[in-house]
Amino acid sequence: MSIHRSCFKAIALCLAVFAWPVLLAAPVLQDQKPSIAVLEPVGNSAVSQINKMTAYGALQQYIINTRRYRVVDRSRTDQILKEHTFARNGMVDNTKVKEIGKMLNSDMVCVTEMRKEDGAFIVTCSLIDVESGEVTASGYELLEADTAVEIRNGINRAVLTMLGMEESAPRPAATPTTVSPSVEDALQNPKHARIAIIIPETHITKKIPDPAAETAITKKLLEAGFTRVVDRDQVEKIRNSDMGKALMRNDIAAVKDIGRQLGVDYVMAGEAFSESVGNVAGGMFSCRARVEAKIFRTDNARMIAANGFHAGGVDLTEATAAKKALSNAGDLMGDYMVKQILSVGSSSASGIKLTVTGVLSFSKVSELSNAIKAIKGVENVRTHEYSNTVATLDITASLSAQTMAENMGRIAKPSVEITDVSGSAISIRIR
């Protein structure tokens, strides 16, 4: 019996000896991708915080999408920067970058600088090796505007250059105006729309630190298939600003401005508040909340829905009961807004005013009108006025003004030049 036991031990020992190198190597084989810590972009005073947050989100998204790297969790990076008070107003020097990288156990650190001056907007992305502290790769882009769409596209190109991948993703051809490639798709397929939710919350006179109603609405949209809801960090500065308040006053300029800044198709704006009802049985706290919200299309600033909902919440503490009440009211609002976007969405046509200069004859107006009618999504084109080489046309279409302008730029005859595009108006010149 002891001989059998001894043989068994010997065999087990041999297996362990042979398996040991494999066990040591296993974690390495499973995790061979280099890790990158992405720092929040820095910039001069002309670069807004919204611009920086847009770039920050795009940086992480594009690096993750390459599937070549492990990106350090953003919350960990922010926590390290906060706890160790590293400078964030200017570019962090390479010595500090090495220190940050080692604290985050990353192989590389990505730093980005954004500068806007004398009409130029430049973005530079650099990779710094944590071990050596040296810049190993970089990419830069000159942006045409400070819109969210242009920043995301510019960051994408800079990252691809930095990572040596520019050949696999050719730069898109220039268009007469800066147009998101997803605008037409978003308007024809509501679930592809980019949506920003701006709903500040208070409990009596106290600001709620983590928006509960906003989170509930976002959750409902995501569950319904709306996958492009803007990250709440990108709208943080707007949430309690004058621009956010202007949205609740149906300020058309504010709707269009936020649409351009964030590159979104819809803006949902409102306010939420909760208040204590008092103690209930078992020492629990009860609160009631109300969420009011409106949603606008940003291409023409048209309000497509508005409503308000009440709900209650009960918990051991007043603060948690307030958040539960806000979350419950947010669920109701989310369900309502999902139905409204899907039913109203982009199916209803809107009016676009077209101003045409350089018109030498009325036949050119007719030629242009027929060319516009041939664009998919256009329902009607009516000549409103023609005088002194200037014509105005009224277009009814299910397309946004931006998408319409992009399509008009492709018209072969008569050849036109896009000179201006706003929420519901286009200006062109016949060449």
Image (cartoon, rainbow, N blue to C red):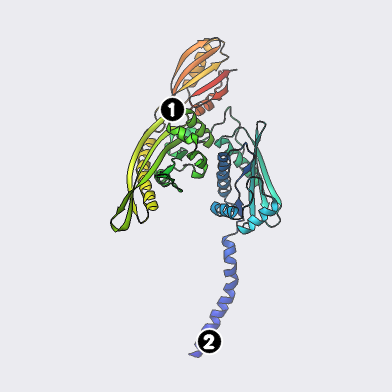
Return the x and y of residue 149 as percentages of the image width and height: 55, 36
Mark 1 residue type = Ser
Outermost residue toward the left in this view = 281
The quadrant where residue 170 appears: top right
Nearest the eye: 357 or 280? 280
Single out the mark in the foreground, 2 or 1. Answer: 1
Label 2 packing within 10 angstroms: few (<14), some (14-19), many (20+): few
Q: In x, y percent, where is residue 397? A: 44, 25
Q: Which residue is mark 1?
A: 398
Q: Position of residue 91 (x, y in %)?
A: 67, 46
Left or right of residue 44: residue 244: left
Instruction: Identify the residue at image location x=41%, y=26%.
Output: 349
- The residue under the point 57% across, 69% down is 23
Marking on residue 152: none
Residue that badge 2 annotates = 6
The answer to which of 54 and 14 lies nearer the viewer is: 54
Residue 415 versus residue 76: which sits nearer the camera?
A: 76
- Rendered view: 165 above or below 299: below
Q: Position of residue 366 (x, y in %)?
A: 50, 14
